[in-house]
Amino acid sequence: MRDIRVAKPYARALYEAAVEQEVLPSITADIEKLRELIEQSEEFTQFINSPLLTPQIKSDTFQQLFTDGVHPLTINFFKLLALKQRERYLVAIMDVFSAIVDEAAGRVVAKVTTAVPVTQNQEQQLVQQLSAYSGKQVRLETETDEQIQGGFIVQLGDTVFDASVTTQLQRLKRQLAKG
């Protein structure tokens, strides 16, 4: 909960600066690149969360790492987070930033959990069906979780569609227990 409270003002400030400077697509792409880096690199995640490194070292490292191919506004934002010792909230800030961008664009995020990876064709079908249901453009976030055994779980805003095999088996078990 604290992460969100800290993240909101920073995410809002980054969004407003990007809109004001008319560089929102560049900043959004930078945030997605950083999200991939965090997901793929345990070392980078440890660097961000390390209490042993001074804010100045982290700021300088951000400057060196992201000079090429990253917008200066993004670099300055990362440096600010390091100097304010808020870099450990970076993932939460990126999540809130993405939510702000999606909301402003009239998009809704659908989180889809499946037992096996979703094919591109299945993703397209899900996006079409969920867009028709919600009346908004849908951005899909997929996750694989073998524990659901099969089927899928979709979270679209406050609505959850649970068509997982695990849930169906649990319902069947309860019905059989009732008699």
Image (cartoon, helix red, strand yellow):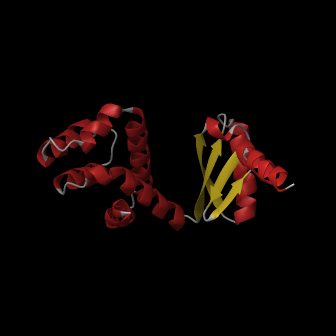
> How many marks are shown on the rendered structure?
0
Residue 82 is left or right of residue 20, and the answer is: left
Task: Name the side, left or right, on which 175 lies relative to 138.
Answer: right
Foreground pick, 155 / 33: 155
The percent coordinates of residue 25 (x first, y second) are 45, 53
Please give left or right for residue 83 compared with residue 17 in the image: left
| Residue 52 visible here | yes
Q: Which is nearer the eye, 171 or 135? A: 171
- Pinpoint residue 141: horizontal percent, then vertical percent: 58, 48
Q: Is residue 133 left or right of residue 22?
A: right
- Residue at 38% from the left image edge and 50% from the top image edge: 91
Q: Quadrant of the N terminus?
A: bottom left
Please tell me in which quadrant of the rendered image residue 179 appears. bottom right
- Residue drawn at the location 39% of the way across and 61% of the way down: 22
| Residue 68 visible | no
For the residue pair 65 and 43, the one nearer the viewer reads as 43
Which residue is found at the position 81% from the left and 49% from the top? Answer: 172
Residue 56 is situated, as x and y percent measured from the top left of the image, at 12, 46
